[in-house]
Image (cartoon, grey):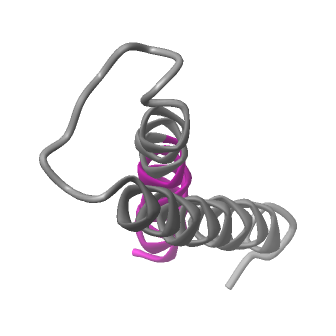
Amino acid sequence: MEPYRQKSKKLSAMINGLMGLCYVCVALVLLFHEQLHLHFSLDNTFVDVFGAIVLIYGTYRIIKGWKSFFSFSGRDH
């Protein structure tokens, strides 16, 4: 039963990292929306601040997933 639990935790860590990557991609689109010729009905300052917050959160998710993935790689419990 333990190998299944370990695989489940590794899969969860991978999904966490992939979601973080998605958040970073969305943040980059928000931060560079003017260069991409995208126009939002919101204020540009609000879009930039929200993009920065999403970028920080996405980076946090990637780091959390990375640490979780490699913390289970050498353990047998």
Q: Residue furthest right?
A: 74
- Please give the name of the residue rendered at 74% of the width and 76% of the height, measured from the top-left corner: 76
Camera-side residue: 56 or 5? 56
Q: Main secondary structure of the magenta part?
A: helix
Camera-side residue: 32 or 22? 32
Residue 14 locus on image (x, y percent): 53, 50
Camera-side residue: 14 or 57? 57
Camera-side residue: 53 or 75? 53
Count of marks overlaid on the render: 0
Residue 77 location, quadrant = bottom right
Residue 45 locus on image (x, y percent): 45, 63
Q: Is residue 65 magenta?
A: no
- 70 relative to 64 in the view: left or right: right
- 41 relative to 32 in the view: left or right: left
Residue 64 location, quadrant = bottom right
Residue 21 locus on image (x, y percent): 53, 43
- Please give the name of the residue rendered at 44% of the width and 14% of the height, measured from the top-left corner: 36
- Please give the name of the residue rendered at 53% of the width and 18% of the height, measured from the top-left corner: 35
Q: Residue furthest bottom?
A: 77
Is 16 placed above or below 49 here?
above
Residue 37 location, quadrant = top left
Q: Residues in magenta? A: 1-21
- 10 relative to 26 in the view: left or right: right
Q: Residue furthest left?
A: 41
Residue 1 locus on image (x, y percent): 39, 75
Q: Is residue 2 magenta?
A: yes
Is 21 placed above or below 53 here?
above
- Please give the name of the residue rendered at 49% of the width and 47% of the height, measured from the top-left corner: 27
